Amino acid sequence: MMLAACEEGDEEDEAENIFEHDWTGLCYTAALRWAREADDEGWMVVHGTVLSEKVGKRIEHAWCERGDWVVDLAMPVGARFVGREQYYRVVKPENAKVYSAEEAVVLSLKHRHDGPWD
């Protein structure tokens, strides 16, 4: 029982670490990691371009979506889990390619990197 309790704690700690980690410049890795390790199934990995206020132009980017929610771990802590409508209004994604978590893992193994894969 102790081992099971420790393992459960490790999973919760791991999820918290993913959400709190500094993913600056690692959006593809972060999106893949979230899709693989999120407790809830159904997350999709999305690659596309977004409008970056920081650099004043469109940049290539990766994030995860499921239903009406977006997880973008490259955003500042506290703004990483947002409604899809709000996310799309702010960063104006374009050229989106959507992958299931399973497809994303297979492509990362096939190409030996976390993306983009086109």
Image (tube, helix red, strand yellow):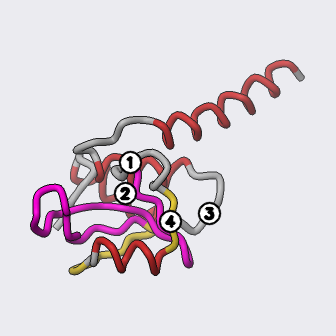
Q: Residue at x 36, y 52 (%)?
A: 75
Which of the labelled discs sits on residue 41, or is there none?
Answer: 3
Q: Which secondary structure is most common in the magenta stretch?
A: strand
Mark 4 neighbour class, 10 Å CA radius: few under 14, some 14 to 19, many 20 or more? some
Residue type at mark 2 is: Val
Q: Residue 85's spot in the image, x, y percent?
A: 46, 80
Mark nearer the viewer, 2 or 4: 4
Which label's residue is closer to the chain start, 3 or 4? 3
Q: Residue at x 23, y 80 (%)?
A: 94
Which label's residue is closer to the chain start, 1 or 4? 1
Q: Is the residue 21 above or below the residue 52 in the image? A: above
The residue at which mark 4 appears reads as: 82
Residue type at mark 4 is: Val
Q: Secondary structure at mark 2?
A: helix
Q: Residue 96's spot in the image, x, y percent?
A: 28, 77
Residue type at mark 3 is: Glu
The residue at which mark 1 appears reads as: 76
Foreground residue, 71 or 28?
A: 71
- Label 3 – label 4 distance at C-alpha: 17 Å
Q: Is residue 30 magenta?
A: no
Mark 1 neighbour class, 10 Å CA radius: few under 14, some 14 to 19, many 20 or more? few
Range shown magenta: 45-73
Mark 2 neighbour class, 10 Å CA radius: few under 14, some 14 to 19, many 20 or more? few
Mark nearer the viewer, 3 or 4: 4
Q: Secondary structure at mark 4?
A: strand
Mark nearer the viewer, 3 or 1: 1
Mark nearer the viewer, 1 or 2: 1
The residue at which mark 2 appears reads as: 106
